[in-house]
Amino acid sequence: MSALRRFAASPLALGAAFALALIVLAAVFAPLIAPQDPYDLAQLDVMEGRLPPGAASLDGGRRYWLGTDEQGRDMLSAIFYGLRSSLYVGVSATLCALALGALLGVAAGYFGGWFESMVMRIVDLQLSFPAILIALILIAVLGQGVEKVIVALIAVQWAYYARTARSAAVVESRKEYIEAAVCQGVGTARVLMRHLLPNCLPPLVVVATTQIAAAITLEATLSFLGLGLPITEPSLGLLIAKGYNYLLSGHYWISVFPGLALVATIVSINLVADRLRDLLDPRLAR
């Protein structure tokens, strides 16, 4: 049975993959499908602020299906743009952290000795602290901005990949194909990049999938606290934080709808990751 058929054998995972595909498409094509550019001040009207879901604009030319916030920003458009930012930050930080952690972990597992001890002690030290604490410290030092948030997330996440890659590399480096490559005089860099690293990727792919959700959650948390993306950038965390002040006054949609979009994204990614783990782990596959 092909990998695609085995994945589709789980209706829950298939539904999550379909939902995730819709979310990704909405984020990628947000400038084309969003009814409004929510961060273009020329398109905002404060007189249309805090309109309930389904309300029409004052001139009757537009309908706000998810309502508006206090600035008259269309919530549906703001969510599309917020998903765009969240996925960009999450995927970018995950890929960079994966590359850094995988290289260090594979090298540590292959060389061993003092290099392995040094890398793993740094990993153990970092993982002993909460991720949110490390991110807060780095954001306080670096300041706000999309690139700075990505750098902070890379610094938080690389240790997970390094530990996983090191464990896989220790097992793979003792196998015959690695010994054969070394006996044939293949260079160390080629052994690491061409032979060892590709065979350590399956567990790293599973970790990367779950860490995308973790990165999105952490970015939303930082933005909710006012320490993540600046207010000029779309962010689900910022939308939730703005709407939080209006919950008690009955304007629930400003905070609830971005929160539901964030939850749907994270749950979809985690369900897909769980299914990938089942398929990529030979013991679970049997």
Image: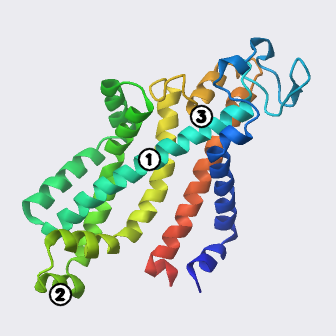
Indicate the amino acid at tag 1.
Ser
First in sequence: mark 1 vs mark 2: 1
Indicate the amino acid at tag 2.
Ala
Q: 40 above or below 114?
A: above
Q: Nearer the viewer, residue 53 or 72?
A: 72
State the mark number for residue 236: 3
State the mark number for residue 17: none
* Pointer 2 residue: 180
Res 82 quadrant in image: top right
From mark 3 to mark 1, how far is it between C-alphas? 17 Å
Indicate the amino acid at tag 3.
Leu
- Residue 5 in the figure: left or right of residue 233: right
Residue extending farthest right? 60
Residue 209, x across and y down, in percent: 48, 58
Residue 168, x across and y down, in percent: 29, 71
Secondary structure beneath dot 1 equals helix
Residue 257, x across and y down, in percent: 71, 35
Question: Residue visible at 15% across and 60% down?
Answer: 116
Residue 203, x across and y down, in percent: 39, 68
Question: Residue visible at 65% across and 23% down?
Answer: 40
State the mark number for residue 92: 1
